[in-house]
Amino acid sequence: MGVIGLEIKSVKELFSGRHFDREIIILCVRWYLRYKLSLRDLAEMMAERGLQLPLTTIMRWVQRYVPEFEKRWVRYMRRSGRSWRVDETYLNVRGRWVYLYRGVDRDGNTVDFRLSPKRDGAAAKAFFRKALRTQGRAPVSITLDGHAASHRAVREMPTENNAWKKSKLRSSKYLNNLIEQDHRGIKFRTRPMLGFKNYDCAATTIAGIELLRRIARTNSRFVPCASKTRLRLPSGMQCSPHEPGPAERPCHPCLQYLHQSLHTPFSFSGYNSFEF
């Protein structure tokens, strides 16, 4: 999804006019995208804690806030490695099979993804263009399966952009096992959804699932420390959200909440109240 360069709203503007607190909204969106739960399962879990949520409300939250979370996350996302494993898997949208192009590097970090109604050379090229915009650099090597359209797309990419001229194309079954296994995380989450009814909703939901998987893998420039007012950088340096370092940006409150909630389990005080 193209999220780079779009206007980012403040937290107050983002959640203004909502009937529920932002913590509850983020919690429901996170649980739905991260765990093997249907909308009905999640509504029942909230009902046990005193919150009556219609299924459509949770679905609208997902469609509303996933693009906003993506716009914030892209500023902190690390670039993946330069050895890409690319493959496509399939999903059901309104009774028809569509194809999800995905790529990971040699360490299993997500390069990019793109949902496409067709599996052909044009779809493969669109994925590689999107991956280049996201990563900002072309890979040194690209490992594919035996699908001829994807191989043809990679060979034709240097005619569009010189950045692809030094990329080496190869086909290796055992090297591509990494991306084949990584598809399981997406299948594991989409199986309880029993297919999608709308292509745009499917694309947004898949983007949210991929985002939560990146956060869980801490594929970002920061790792939240115990204090809520400081960030620990991979290099061991520390900076305050109010005093960002030269190469880092402060963590947005929504992303900090999402990132910390993945590693800090929620506790509930009483039967009808939340404790955050």
Image: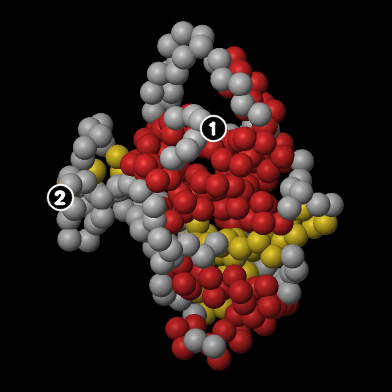
Q: Is residue 177 above or below residue 269?
A: below
Q: Residue at x 77, y 53 (%)?
A: 93
Q: Residue at x 71, y 56 (%)?
A: 199
Q: Residue at x 44, y 40 (%)?
A: 15
Decide if residue 88 is in sight here: no
Q: Mark 2 — residue? A: 243
Label 1: few (<14), some (14–19) or many (≥20) C-alpha neighbours in 10 Å: many
Work out how far the residue at label 2 is from the one at label 1, CA to CA, in angstroms.
32 Å
- Indicate the position of residue 123 as horizontal and vertical percent values: 67, 73
Element type at mark 1:
helix
Residue 110 in the figure: left or right of residue 95: left
- Indicate the position of residue 160 as horizontal and vertical percent values: 54, 88
Closest to the observer, 174 or 54? 54
Q: Amino acid at mark 1?
A: Cys
- The tag on residue 50 is none
- Indicate the position of residue 170 as horizontal and vertical percent values: 59, 75
- Where residue 255 sits, quadrant-wise, is top left
Q: Amino acid at mark 2?
A: Glu
Residue placed farthest to the bottom in the image?
159
Q: Is residue 247 above or below residue 258?
A: below
Q: Mark 1 — residue? A: 28
Closest to the observer, 98 or 219? 98
